[in-house]
Image (tube, grey):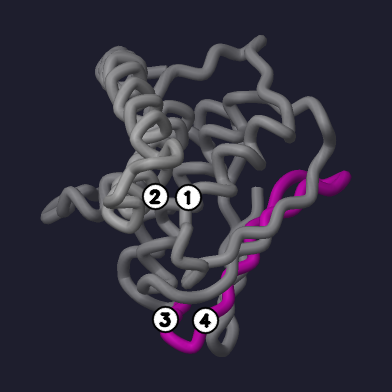
Amino acid sequence: MPQQHHLASLVGSRLCHDLIGPIGAIGNGVELMMLPGNERRDEVAMIAESVASLTARIRFFRVAFGTALADQSISRSEVLAILSGLHPSGRIAITWSSATDLRKAEIRAIFLLILCAEQGLRSTGRIHVQQDGHGWSLSLSSPRLDPHAPHWALLKSDDHTGLSPAEVQFPLAALALASLGREMRLEPSNETLRLSF
């Protein structure tokens, strides 16, 4: 892994580690406020939902942007727990099929690809993640999906000229796949896109 990329992933791990503690404390405080007798339950419920969503997103970022050593693993149940709180509105639905014990480095690449998928789906659609005997695939579907949009080319390009912060996950996903010795395959069709490695 290039030194700069390694340092960036360490920064991601540190930021997420330091943020998750205070967010958890806020969540605990909100739970106390939800106890019977509180007259502002609707407002507190809204805060609780926001805290839960933020916690899920930080846990997700911790895997996507953090470090993942070659021998580290993560359980399917932990992955599903992280993903379950990622889209509380339900506008993007993620389904998952895999083995029980997973390589964290592979899940890191998949989480970065999920970030790519979120941008490609434009806030509505379905993502199905599947592990089989050949590797991993993400199947994306949405009426708003453009499988030929320019940002998909960033998964296979070394040219990051004009890259925006909203697109940083595309080259990071490519780097994560390269560190695994895997190559991305893109199979576009009408309103769908399959990413596999």
Q: Is residue 56 magenta?
A: no
Instruction: Name the residue that disc number 3 marks.
Output: 146
Q: Residue at x 48, y 29 (%)?
A: 63
Which quadrant of the figure has residue 122?
bottom left
Tag count in the figure? 4
Number of residues whose C-alpha sits closer than 10 Å to that of mark 4, classed few (under 14), some (14–19) or many (20 or more):
many
CA gap, disc 3 and disc 1: 23 Å
Please, what is the three-letter code of the amino acid marked with disc 1? Leu
In depth, the one of 23 and 9 nearer the eye is 23
In the image, residue 103 sits, relative to residue 53, either above or below, namely above
Please, what is the three-letter code of the amino acid marked with disc 4? Ser
Which quadrant of the figure has residue 31?
top left
Please, what is the three-letter code of the amino acid marked with disc 2? Glu
* Horizontal and vertical percent position of residue 110: 56, 43
Number of residues whose C-alpha sits closer than 10 Å to that of mark 2, classed few (under 14), some (14–19) or many (20 or more):
some
Region rendered in magenta: 129-147
Disc 2 secondary structure class: helix
Question: In this orientation, does residue 171 appear?
Answer: no
Number of residues whose C-alpha sits closer than 10 Å to that of mark 3, classed few (under 14), some (14–19) or many (20 or more):
some
In depth, the one of 82 and 2 nearer the eye is 82
C-beta proximity under 8 Å, tags 1 and 2: no
C-beta proximity under 8 Å, tags 3 and 1: no
Q: Residue at x 44, y 36 (%)?
A: 35
C-beta proximity under 8 Å, tags 2 and 4: no
Q: Earlier in the sequence, mark 3 or mark 2?
A: 2
Give the numbered dot on residue 23: none
CA gap, disc 4 and disc 1: 18 Å
CA gap, disc 3 and disc 4: 9 Å
Q: Earlier in the sequence, mark 1 or mark 2?
A: 2
CA gap, disc 2 and disc 4: 26 Å
Give the numbered dot on residue 49: 2
Instruction: Name the residue that disc number 4 marks.
Output: 142
